[in-house]
Image: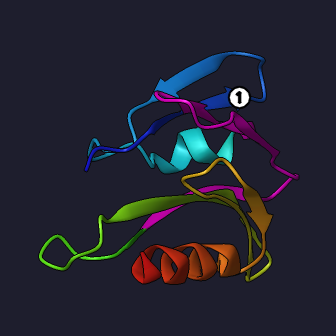
Amino acid sequence: MPFAYFAEAELDDGSRVALDLEEHGWADKELLARTVRWSLIPRTGLPLVVVNIPPGGKPVFKSRVYGTLNGPEVPFRCYATGFHLHGRTFWTWVLPNGSIEVGDDPSLADLQFAEMRKR
């Protein structure tokens, strides 16, 4: 299941760098240290997500798959972006239906997955 997003890092000099989140090495420490705005650019119909990175913050990205390839459910993936600062991580989640949720975990994804299992 390929990622539905690629990333764009806007650097402190105003330049922008496109990053393929599925490629090894996208999380270059020097590049991330200079990032002031981090965007998830959709490859599909999902929403654009832009996070401003505060001074000293480090952009972060992760995805989480719900469901299994062997079970009756069709798996889906949630995406999260945000930043890490002073030992804390601040997440913004995107669900497959385009909903946005802010927090440590995407609680709406659990509800969406439970609904899907009932069908």
Residue 48 placement (x, y as % from top left): 69, 33
Q: How many marks?
A: 1
Picture coordinates of residue 115 (x, y %)?
54, 78
Q: Is residue 29 above or below residue 103?
A: above
Viewer-nearest residue: 34 or 88: 88
Q: Residue furthest top?
A: 15
Q: At which x and y percent is residue 12? A: 78, 29
Vertical placement of residue 99 versus 102, above or below: above
Residue 77 screen position, x and y as percent: 43, 60
Instruction: Classify 67 as above or below 53.
Output: below
- The front one of 77 and 54 is 77
Say if the magenta span includes residue 34.
no
**Which color scheme is applied?**
rainbow
Farthest front residue?
119
Residue sitting at 68 percent across and 81 percent down?
A: 107
Residue 109 falls in image quadrant:
bottom right
Residue in view at x 68 percent, y 36 percent: 47
Q: Which residues are magenta?
A: 35-64
Viewer-proximal residue, 5 or 67?
A: 67
Q: Which element type, helix, strand or loop, lies under badge 1?
A: strand
Amino acid type, callout 1: Leu
Q: Considering depth in this image, is 72 or 15 the residue closer to the camera?
A: 72
Residue pictured at 80% horizontal, 78% vertical:
86
Q: Is residue 28 left or right of residue 25?
A: right
Q: Quadrant of the C terminus?
A: bottom left
The majority secondary structure of the magenta stretch comes to: strand
Which residue is labeled 1 in the image?
A: 11
Q: Is residue 71 left or right of residue 79?
A: left
Q: Is residue 6 above or below residue 29?
A: above
